[in-house]
Image (cartoon, coloured by chain):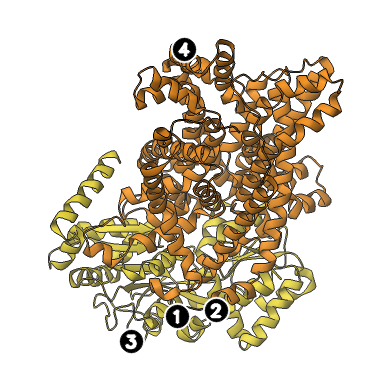
Amino acid sequence: MLSGLLAGALGLAACSSSGGTAQAASRQTTQRVPLVVYSAKNYMPGVGTAFTKKTGIPVELVNHSTGTLLAKIQAERSDPQWGLLWIDGAAACAALDQQGMLLRGFEPDAGQLTSLGKELVPADHSYVPTAVTIAGALVYNPKVLPDPPSSFSQLTEPQYRGKVGMNNPAISGPTYTFVAGLMHQLGGVGPGEAFFERLAANGLQVFSTNKVTLTALLQGRIAMAIVQNNAGIEFAEKYPQLKVVYPTAATMLPSVICIDGHAPKAEVAEAKEFADYVYTPAGQAVMKAVNPYGGWPIMQGVTPAPLLPALSSLPVQKIATRTWGAREASITQWFSEHVVNG
Amino acid sequence: MANDRGPASRRWFRGGGPWRLAVWGVVALLLVVPSLCFLVQAVSPRLFGQGRAWWTGANVAAAWHQGLGVALAHSVVVGAAAALLAVVVAGGLAVVVERTTAVGRGATVLGLWAVLLCPSYLIAVGWEEIVLRAGMLSALGLWSPALQHLVLGPVGVAVVLGLKGVPFAYFALAPSMAAVGGDLEHAVRAHGGRRWATLRVLGPLLLPAVLSGLVIVFAESVGDFGVASTIAATAHFPVATYLLYEAISTFPVNFGVAAVVGWALVGTVGAALLVQSGLLRGRSFAVLGSRGRAARRRQLGWRGQLGAAGFRAAFFLLALGVPVLGVLFSSVLVPFKGFGLSALTLANYRALLGVQGLAGPIRFSGEMGLVCGLATVALGAVLARTMAASQRGVAGRLLDLTLVAAVALPGVVFAAGYIFAYDLPALTRLGIVLYGTVPLLGMAYVANAVPQSSRILLGPFSQVRDSLLYAARVHGAGTSRAWREGVLPLLARPLLWAFLLAFAGIFLELPISELLAPPNVVPVSVAVLRVLGKADIGEGTALSVVAVLVVLGVVALALGLFRLLAPLGWRRWSEGTGGAEHAGVRAARRRAGQVGGPDAAVGAAREAA
């Protein structure tokens, strides 16, 4: 690190004298440049290493939660630093697209999407779906709760009073998709808000993220936790006393890649290569090997991990990404005021 | 405090002219500019591409609509309660340590440093683990819903913040508690006054220190996020920092609302400083002179010793013992297995040993902690010196306000502010590329740590008298030698502790590390978060225990090295009972009084060093 500090200082001096930055200079060339990847996917380090090994393209990785990455991208709007973003949640990418930040019209040509995969591709091809998770699954302990609900709409019944915990959608992006999906199922924003008010009155407990909510389940503060399904499966694998179920309606949450539309051409070309690689059997195999619960694959010929139930057996639904994405700010704000702090 | 008058040509000793300009330049680059770049978005989001309006009041309205009024009121109430609790407890501790012969005074101060090093988050989680339905009390059959309700509510928030604030209040109070007294106490007694009369005379003289302690604990409490994100968040008790966190974590990110909350925090602390200033205005509290008489320690009998020990034990039990027990409990217990020997496991600790790839992050953060910790202490010492020399001037007050306001702003504000301030195309065109580099990360670490560091050092530096420096200069010593041989020996220990505090903070710092670490660079907190991302409370608390043990190991190592390697005079002169880092100064003052002047003091200091 000391050498890093020195190198940083020397780099600054060198840049000052040459009137341009190394990064800026490298971005102007058409040669291999570092591909800066902002990723919330925990299989990204493995995929990145395999990609570099195959193509020779160096990957510079910033690996944080989706919320942190989106905050960083938003703060960097004056001078974007990222080349490719890989997160859970198409709504965020749709919003970035509406702000004119994304590359449009790109579709990987490696591999064949399943019919579900094709349905997830946006009309303007501003982002690339890579897998599917479920935004809200129910994790519970059968000894404590022998009779879990089969539908989320049952959560307001008296027998579940004070037993339900979920994440705060203002902090956990996937949870917003769950809230939006439930509102969609119930008939819109109005009926959805009325439902959550009843749920809050029935003792709903709201925590910040998956980890905190699942911890509350361990601590006995709640009897069931609504979390993203992959987090729930990993937790249930560690504690076999717990079960994961998918009440109606389970809302799909796609994992997506999007590319900075204002990045230098060389970096955009490399980002496209990366997306292509993710669609290849080799890329899919690395994803599955690093994290088997990362999501249901949407490429033909790729099978899901054994612990994932067949997607066709679940009561899943899709919601209109742009419609519900545009409502995210107002709904999360309403949720904070009326449910979290109400 | 009385300031020695020196020749005008030597005003720079006390922070005048170019010196002050340089200090302000550094403070502006590190603290003021990034903070303002963030805060300005409350009214002008377009300035940094965050919206269409150059000027708008919409964010203020939105923040209010989202409950800023209630959250701020909660923050103020728990902050005030925490400050009051901390000052009362710290006052008691200062009396015991500084004015009595109670045994274990040195250990008390060490314990206070341990509380200071323990993150508020960990104290809060520890308490949760004790009082929850599936917690330790429940396992022992002692669970009480009333106690759970009490601890996991506003009262618990205030108490945890108050306990965490005790060291800050102590370090503000202890020097005055030790210094105020001697002559006045003697005079009261000579006039027939008893204990109550002595208290009535001496009590008001402690007012500046009491107010200083109240303000710093209040600022620390309203700016705290560890308790806000745990006990307060789950108790449906919104506080301002949590509102700020929500605004930054949500999508689309709402920097405008977060900035309004930031202004509210700064304004709240500013108001507290104004109250402090108003209460002290026009009154003199100068009691220290070179011929002052040291305060007399009260001899404690066995009852007194027992009471003093009980009081300290109760404090440390609540502030450290119970939470540590709670954290350990959750890290060694298998969930769903009840409470018994068969339910105990070290699996969480074994799992940590199996985690790959932590060595690099630990080394990186260790080196950053070392380099930036030293830079923090150097800058903190300069700022403390500047504030001590100009406390009554406008510049001194402004610096004080800047640093206290910075304490009230969460680290994420600095992190985002650094992006706005240093990730600009204009800077890139000028060839200044700091954003995305390790040096900028280091700057942010220093900016985040220096307000606390300077606050810790203010007390000791306030008691270093300019006469020491003047005398050294008269005897032919250069500036650096005068500081090195005349002053450094007196301040070695507080500087060491300030460094250790900065090191611990930087080593485990998260929001700045997340937003500002360059690609492919992973600080230890980020690496830990990745592990925790899929871990449960057991592994999480085990990891926290290990992290704190690592920091305590570094502290022990540093103190051991200090004892082994520091010159004898440094140890002798700066050791004491703690807040009594000033003991050396008192000794110097006593010697000066005995032989007739400040020259003797610096001579004595140099002789000892």
Q: Nearer the viewer, mark 2 or mark 3?
A: 2
| CB contact under 8 Å: marks 4 and 1 | no
Which residue is denoted by mark 1 in the rendering? B53
| CB contact under 8 Å: marks 2 and 3 | no
Distance in Å between CA atoms under marks 4 and 1: 64 Å
Mark 4 and mark 1 lie on one chain; the one further toward the N terminus is: 1
> Is disc 1 on the same chain as disc 3?
no
What hue represents chain A?
yellow
Which residue is denoted by mark 2 in the rendering? B58
Q: Nearer the viewer, mark 2 or mark 4?
A: 4
Q: Residue B570: x percent and y percent?
A: 47, 18
Q: Residue B148: x percent and y percent?
A: 77, 50
Question: Quick one: label 4, few (<14), some, or many (20+) residues within 10 Å?
Answer: some
> Is disc 1 on the same chain as disc 4?
yes
Which residue is denoted by mark 4 in the rendering? B608
At label 3, the amino acid type is Asp
At label 2, the amino acid type is Ala
Distance in Å between CA atoms under marks 2 and 4: 63 Å
At label 1, the amino acid type is Ala
Say what secondary structure mark 4 lies in. Answer: helix
Which residue is rendered at x = 41% and y = 25% of the image? B483
Which residue is rendered at x = 27% and y = 80% of the image? A107
Q: Is residue A136 visible?
A: yes
What hue represents chain B?
orange
